[in-house]
Image (tube, rainbow, N blue to C red):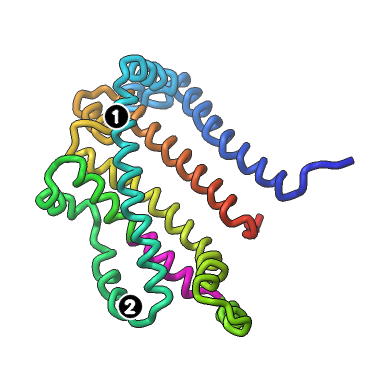
Amino acid sequence: MTGKPPRMRLETQERLLAIVSPLALLVVWQVMSWLKLLDARFIPSPITIGEGAYRLVESGELWTHLSVSLWRLAAGFVVAAVPGILLGLVMGLSRWVRMILDPIVAATYPIPKIAILPLIMLFFGIGEVSKIVIIAVAVIYLVLINTMVGVMTIDPVYFDVAKNYGAPWPKLFTRVIIPGALPLIFAGLRLGLGVSLIVIVAAEFVAAKSGIGYLIWISWETLVIENMFVGIIVITVLGVVTTFILREIERAVIPWRRERA
């Protein structure tokens, strides 16, 4: 009698838990609303929010806001991830580059990224470019730092073995450096993805006429609370879905990695 390997069963259980836990939260939320334990004026029930979502979908308004936010997120994330990985690799490999750039990174990283949005708008205007730039600025630090640390934490024995076998630099880079740094590179990408969602919503609060952040803000201003919750839930679902996709890509790209239970 054959069955699924233990690791496959564990991954199946993880996926099921990821689906069941939000559904359980919605059930508890709805029951509390029926029991009048929540004030419907400020916290509508999931059914009321679902009705609001249906109206937004039917009118096409939700898709308009979502597509705009997705475009900004994707563009900003790519603009940050590519140079962040490349620069992180260089800083991890070169002590001199690290000595030059690390103080700059350490000095500018703690600055709240949304605080420099007015400055970015001053340079790039109030159009799409400023939203993409603020996302990129927020993401690049996390990707860069994690990539640099990933390279620096590779066991030196791997470099020694490669040199003893006379491995050329391209093979050393593709067989040792990249595989060794990949786990922390993906960690940086996942952190950057979460931060990008926070930043885009904040940017759309104050400097946009479309997007999920704008939908949340305008719904609050007009006291259409169910639409505000729709926007919040959409951002939540977007974060879960994008993180899930990135995790699946990570599992495919790093098949040798074994997560601890």
Q: Secondary structure at mark 2?
A: helix
* Mark 2 surroundings within 10 Å by alpha-carbon count, few (fewer than 14), some (14 through 19), many (20 or more): few
* Mark 1 surroundings within 10 Å by alpha-carbon count, few (fewer than 14), some (14 through 19), many (20 or more): some
Q: In what quadrant of the picture does the N terminus appear? A: top right
Q: Quick one: 2 or 26, which is closer to the camera?
A: 2
Residue 125 in which image quadrant: top left
Depth-wise, is mark 2 or mark 1 nearer the camera? 2
Name the disc covering residue 97, or none: 2
Q: Quick one: 87 or 62, which is closer to the camera?
A: 87
Amino acid type of the residue that numbered disc 1 sits on in the rendered structure: His
Q: Residue at x 44, y 70 (%)?
A: 149
State how far apart marks 2 and 1 are (Cα): 42 Å
Using the image, determine if residue 157 lies above or below residue 248.
below
User: Is residue 152 rendered magenta in the image?
Assistant: yes
Q: Secondary structure at mark 1?
A: helix
Q: Report the residue that reaches farthest toward the left.
A: 122
In this rendering, would 113 be left or right of 47? left
> Magenta segment, which residues?
141-154
Using the image, determine if residue 168 lies above or below residue 261.
below
Residue 20 in which image quadrant: top right
In this rendering, would 47 be left or right of 71? right
Mark closest to the chain's N terminus, 2 or 1 = 1
User: Is residue 229 rendered magenta in the image?
Assistant: no
Image coordinates of residue 16 in percent, x first then y, are: 62, 37
Identify the residue under disc 1. 65
Image coordinates of residue 178 in percent, x first then y, are: 51, 66
Q: Report the residue that reaches farthest toward the right.
A: 1
Q: Residue at x 37, y 55 (%)?
A: 81
Q: Residue at x 50, y 43 (%)?
A: 245
Q: Main secondary structure of the magenta part?
A: helix
